[in-house]
Image: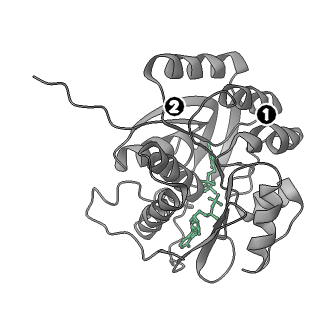
Amino acid sequence: MTPRSAPPRVLTVAGSDSGGGAGIQADLKTMLALGTHGMSVITAVTAQNSLGVHGAWPLPATAVIAQFRAVVDDIGVQAVKTGMLASAELVEAVAGLLRPLDVPVVVDPVGVSKHGDALLAHDALDAVRHRLLPVATVATPNLDEVTQLTGVTVTDESGLRTAAAAILALGPQWALIKGGHLPGDALDLLTDGITEHWLRAPRLDNSHTHGTGCTLASAIAAGLAADRTVPDAVAAAKDYVTGAISAGFALGSGIGPVDHGHRLRGGGDGAAVLG
Ligand SMILES: Nc1ncnc2c1ncn2[C@@H]1O[C@H](COP(=O)(O)OP(=O)(O)O)[C@@H](O)[C@H]1O
Ligand SMILES: Cc1ncc(COP(=O)(O)OP(=O)(O)O)c(N)n1
């Protein structure tokens, strides 16, 4: 029997969310839903549910480096996504591992959870700015992360351009500024400083949005691993996350997760538009 050819391989370097809505768990579910083989380097363990983060324990840098080497040196990767990196030491270590790797890297510079819990030490911001963002193919900050990293505050759609310029100045090839925290349509701006792509979706009236950022970044990495261009991968990822938010469900007594399996359950995507 002829062996089947392997699907595109995608690696997430992120923290574990015990509730299964964000972090490594969201990333691997997204990667499977989008037809890729997901692999993981766990940077930290969190005790987390729909009400918030109740504890977080970063792993030693040696454990992070060993997981990364085990995957990359044997199986190989075609794209990487980074999420929660917890400490300056882990940001430095991960940036050092990614620098020589010749594959697209999606950096979600996770700072704070939806509930306001810190997922990155304050003294790690400089390492994110000067070590991690320069190795990113695409950086995907939300508006709070834009402010943390650049000092730019965005209060309306016109501010997304200023935010993108400030993020691009830190070195990623593309900036995807997520406007999910603004009122009105869910509008994001993707730019490499030359071209601009506006991604607009209707704001969905669903409070179960835990994991939106992780899901979007992982979907982009899945698209890049499958050889899509950055604008195509981002447009497809926006469709996927819009569908996942639309199908998000109530689990626990707080903010429930988006539904990573919505396509498997027959749900359609949202009407996101790439302009
Ligand atoms: N209520 C919503 N309806 C539709 N899209 C949303 C909604 N909330 C967030 N999004 C979209 O989800 C993606 C993740 O954005 P965001 O929630 O801002 O990220 P994060 O989880 O990092 O805070 C973006 O594409 C954003 O526009
Ligand atoms: C372990 C872990 N990593 C990242 C996050 C933040 O995820 P995000 O997709 O931004 O979703 P919300 O926390 O904003 O719902 C997390 N919570 N846990």
Q: Disc 2 residue type? A: Ser
219 with respect to 66 (left or right): left
- Residue 233, position as x, y percentages in the image: 48, 56
Q: Which residue is identified by label 1?
A: 87
Residue 156 placement: quadrant: bottom right
- Residue 12, position as x, y percentages in the image: 54, 37
Position of the N terminus, as image quadrant, is top left
* Element type at mark 2: strand
Q: Is residue 209 above or below residue 124?
A: below
Residue 60 visible, this orientation: no
Residue 209 placement: quadrant: bottom right
Q: Residue at x 68, y 71 (%)?
A: 181
User: Is residue 199 or residue 169 the one in the foreground?
Assistant: 169
**Within-10-Å neighbours for mark 1: few <14, some 14–19, many 20+:** many
Q: Residue at x 57, y 28 (%)?
A: 41
Q: Disc 1 residue type? A: Ser
Q: Is mark 2 within 8 Å of ligand 2?
A: no
Q: Residue furthest bottom?
A: 184
User: Which mark is on residue 97?
Assistant: none
- Residue 11, position as x, y percentages in the image: 51, 34
Q: Residue at x 70, y 37 (%)?
A: 85
Q: Residue furthest front?
A: 194
**Within-10-Å neighbours for mark 2: few <14, some 14–19, many 20+:** many
Q: Which residue is identified by label 2?
A: 40
For the residues labelled 2 and 1, the Cα–Cα distance comes to: 18 Å
* Element type at mark 1: loop
Q: Earlier in the sequence, mark 2 or mark 1?
A: 2
